[in-house]
Image (tube, helix red, strand yellow):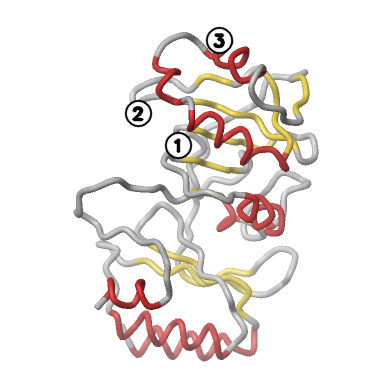
């Protein structure tokens, strides 16, 4: 049933446990925007703009994260783009294997060219199993052009404990509400998900946020609609 639904809407999908060549989701901290502390220039729109730039389906794990938030890990991916204090510029940390310490790229990357650099790194990823980050930097410097900026100060990437993201909370800028929904095994009844999506459409909510934990968040809930969400959650226990 799930496969048929995805095929009808011509959407790529992965069924957990199936073998074969797999693409990766791009993990971003969009979910934390306007509900947690953030770098001054980062907003929900910045994340959406960056994601729209990706015109290919990555095979590498890509993280795009704000270091001020604590909901999404900064170094989860193989390519980890982390917001800098300078508007529209990002640090890049590369991790070839899960047990390897991430290595910082020698320059910051401009927002418009994150996709350009990520695609180039993926194409030559097999060559990066040897050598160091300086070698890779020189190698790509002769093959692609992208806007960059010299790193003047080392980034501060302090570990932060994630605070409670269940229940209802108020958003900072919009003054609307968010709802954090958690289920211990991350398996939700289809009937519940269908009712939830119907309520999103009814109340003008177009996005559901998925953090890398057994939960999901609904943002931009108007105060007048809180009672509808309370009723839905109560209906399904």
For the residues bearing labels 3 and 1, Cβ distance under 8 angstroms: no
Image position, residue 106 (x, y; %): 65, 17
Q: Residue at x 40, y 87 (%)?
A: 195
Q: Nearer the viewer, mark 3 or mark 1?
A: 3
Label 1 residue SS: loop
Q: Which of pointers 2 and 1 lies earlier in the amino acid sequence?
A: 1
Task: Say how many tags the image has.
Answer: 3
Residue that extends furthest to the front in the rendered view of this protein: 143
107 vs 215, nearest the viewer = 107
Dot label at residue 98: 2
Image position, residue 202 (x, y; %): 56, 91
Label 2 residue SS: loop
Q: Residue beneath label 3, please?
A: 135
Q: Quadrant of the C terminus?
A: bottom left
Q: Is residue 24 above or below residue 218?
A: above
Q: Which of pointers 3 and 1 lies earlier in the amino acid sequence?
A: 1
Q: Residue beneath label 1, please?
A: 77
Q: Residues within 10 Å of mark 3 (few under 14, many from 20)?
A: few
Dot label at residue 215: none
Q: Which of pointers 2 and 3 lies earlier in the amino acid sequence?
A: 2
**Which corner quadrant of the image does residue 142 belong to?**
top right
Image position, residue 209 (x, y; %): 51, 64
């Amino acid at each position: 049933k799930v496969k048929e639904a995805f095929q009808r809407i011509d959407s790529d999908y992965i069924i957990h446990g199936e073998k074969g060549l797999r693409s990766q989701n791009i993990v971003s901290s969009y979910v934390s925007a306007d509900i947690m502390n953030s770098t001054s220039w980062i907003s929900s729109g910045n994340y959406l703009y960056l994601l729209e730039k990706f015109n290919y389906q990555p095979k590498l794990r890509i993280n795009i994260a704000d270091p001020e938030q604590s909901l999404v890990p900064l170094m989860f991916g193989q390519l980890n783009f982390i917001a800098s204090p300078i508007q529209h510029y990002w640090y890049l940390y590369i991790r070839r294997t899960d047990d390897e310490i991430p290595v910082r790229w020698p320059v910051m990357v401009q927002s418009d060219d994150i996709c350009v650099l990520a695609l180039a790194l993926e194409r030559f990823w097999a060559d990066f199993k040897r050598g160091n980050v300086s070698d890779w930097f020189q190698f790509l410097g002769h093959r692609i052009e992208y806007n960059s900026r010299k790193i003047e100060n080392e980034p501060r990437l302090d570990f932060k404990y994630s605070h409670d993201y269940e229940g209802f909370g108020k958003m900072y800028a919009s003054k609307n509400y968010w709802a954090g929904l958690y289920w211990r095994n991350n398996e939700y009844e289809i009937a519940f998900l269908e009712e939830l999506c119907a309520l999103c459409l009814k109340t003008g909510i177009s996005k559901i946020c998925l953090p890398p934990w057994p939960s999901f968040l609904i943002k931009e809930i108007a105060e007048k609609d809180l009672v509808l969400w309370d009723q839905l959650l109560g209906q399904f226990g």
